[in-house]
Amino acid sequence: MGYIYYCPRCRSTYSTEKDNQQYEQCPSCNIRIIPTHITTDEWHTKTDEEKEAAKKQFDDQAKLSTSQTSSNSNSIGKALRVVGIIYIALSLIGAFILIGEEITIGLIAGVFGCLGGLLLLGFSEIINLLQDIKNK
Ligand SMILES: [Zn+2]
């Protein structure tokens, strides 16, 4: 007796002997595949339409679980992003104040402020991307 597993990336199903294996991998994508708890016999009695509907349901489950993990673990990336935006906003305000007194210094402060903020934003993006890779 086999059980059906579903890969959300290539949308294929696979059957293995054991049910509820948490770390079953897709042979072609090497990502975690979802245990559907449906037996192979049960799956083969389904029509193509029923299979398609079931796959859609599995897709939703997969999305739900990935969005939960990413919202939990990307907090540092998100915090850096917020800090980066505040950093740029504050340095632009500072630059406008300085431009009123001394144009050159104000412009330099604005450019460096934006560069610093962009570096923070870029860094937060890298953290988010790394987290995505880890989640796969
Ligand atoms: Zn796959």
Image: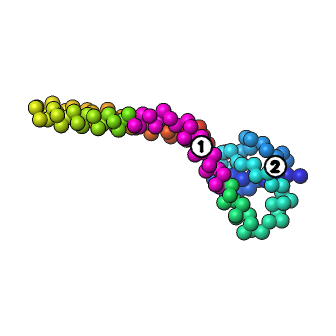
The part of the image, by quadrant, that contains residue 84 is top left
User: Which quadrant of the structure image shows residue 59?
Assistant: bottom right
The one of 105 and 101 positioned closer to us in this rendering: 101
Q: Nearer the viewer, residue 111 or 87?
A: 87
Q: 68 left or right of 96?
A: right
Q: Is residue 61 magenta?
A: yes
Q: In this rendering, is residue 25 above or below 54?
A: above
Mark 2 or 1: the one toward you: 1
Answer yes or no: is residue 14 visible: yes
Which range is magenta?
59-82
Q: Secondary structure at mark 1?
A: helix
In the rendered view, tell whether residue 47 sits above or below residue 85.
below
- Check if residue 13 falls in the magenta segment: no
Residue 117, which numbered label?
none
Question: Residue 8: percent from the left, percent from the top?
Answer: 65, 53
User: Label 1: which residue?
Assistant: 68
Instruction: Name the amino acid type tagged 1.
Output: Gln
Neighbor class of circle 1 (other Cα within 10 Å; few <14, some 14-19, many 20+) is few
Q: Residue under circle 2?
A: 16
The quarter of the rendered structure image containing the C terminus is: top right
Q: Is mark 1 within 8 Å of ligand 1?
A: no
Residue type for callout 2: Thr
